[in-house]
Image: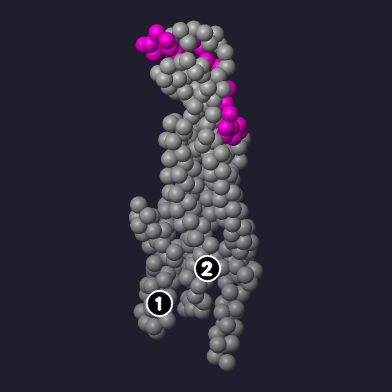
Amino acid sequence: MIDTVKDYLTPKRFSNVAYVCVIVHFLCGLVFTAVTAALRASAIGKFSCIVDPKSTATYKTQVDKVCFSRYDQAYTTPLPLYGYVLLSIRSTVPVSVIYSLVVSKRVDEIESSHERQIKGDAEHHEHGGNRRTVYVFHFYFVQLVLRSLCGIIFTVLQYTFFYPNGFDLKFSCNLLPAEVTSVSNINAQRNASQLNNTSVSCENPTASEKKLFGTIVFVINTIFTFVILVEVIFLSQRFPILNCRSEHSWNGDIEFVNSYFLGKRYINVPDEVTLTSVDKNQQGCIDIYKQQILNLSRVHQI
C-alpha cells in the first residue's frame, strides 16, 4: 500500500514542504489507525463493572457487555476513535493523489523539455513544453486549499461533534433488569431483579490511552493544517495574472514547475509570443517578464 501511494505521489509534482506533509501524514495515519484499533479491541476485554461479589461470572460478563455498549454510545458516537483517525489523517491523501494524476503528464513534459534545453537540443522548441499554461499552478493551489479545509474541519469537529465528552476512566451505568435477564441462569435473573434501575460503577482502563492518542492526533492535524495554510497564503500572493506585474510572481506553468517544484532557474525566452488574444494588461506583463529574462541573461554573460 505504501509503495502504491509513493508511485502516485511523486516529489517533483509538489513543493518539498507539501510533499513531506502528505507522506508523513499518511504514515501517521497508518500507525495511529493500527494503535487506536488495538486499543478498541483491548477495551472490550478490560472494561469492568463492580457487581455483587455473590453474582455469577456469567452475570458479571453480561453486565460488562451491556455497560460497555452504553459507554461506547456515550463516548465514541458516531465514530470509534480509529475510524476518526482513518478519516482525519488520511483524508488528505486522496486529494493529493488525484491532483498528482491530473498534472503528471504536464509536469513530466516540462521537466523533459527543460532537460533537453540544458543539453542544447535545438528541437526542444518543437516540444509541447513551451506551451503557455497555468493549470498546474491552479490545480496545485486548489489541492492545497482542500487539504487545509479537511484539516480544519476534522480538527474542529474532534471536540465539538465526535468526542465532546472525551474519554472518562469512570462510568456510571444505569441498568434495567430486562437488559440482563436474557442470561439463562437463575442466579443471574435473581441478581438482575434486585437492581431496580440502580447505578453500576464501571471502569475503562484504556481511557487515558485513548485520550493521549486523541490529543496527539489533534496536534498532528493542527500542525499540518497550519503548514499547508502558510503555503496557501504564500502562493496566493504570487498568483499568476492577478499579480503578473509583481517581480515575485510566476508567469506560467513552465516557470512555476521549474522554480517551485524542480528547483531550477527558468531562463528560456520564447521565440514568439502571440499577443492578438491578450489584453493590454497581459501584454504589459509579458513585456516586463521578457525584460527581466534579458537582464538575467546579460548578468550571466558578464
- On screen, 276 above or below 118? above
As drawn, is 172 to the left or to the right of 274? right
Q: Which residue is mark 1?
A: 115
Answer with mark 1 or mark 2, whichever residue precedes in sequence.
Answer: 1
- For badge 2, the amino acid type reads Tyr
Q: Residues within 10 Å of mark 2 (few under 14, many from 20)?
A: some
Q: Nearer the viewer, residue 28 or 212?
A: 212
The residue under label 1 is which amino acid type?
Glu
Residue visible at 52% across and 77% down in the picture: 265
Q: From the viewer's side, name the closer residue of 42 and 284.
A: 42
Residue at 43% x, 40% y: name it. Answer: 38
In this view, 82 is above or below 95 = above
Q: Position of residue 85 (x, y in %)?
A: 49, 43
Residue 77 coordinates in the image, percent (x, y): 52, 29
| Label 1 packing within 10 angstroms: few (<14), some (14-19), many (20+) | few
Q: What segment carries the magenta color?
A: 164-188
Which image quarter is the C terminus in? Answer: bottom right
Residue occupying the far front of the picture: 54
Residue at 58% over, 32% down: 168
The quarter holding residue 58 reads: top left
- Tell me the element at label 2: helix
Q: Which mark is residue 260?
A: 2
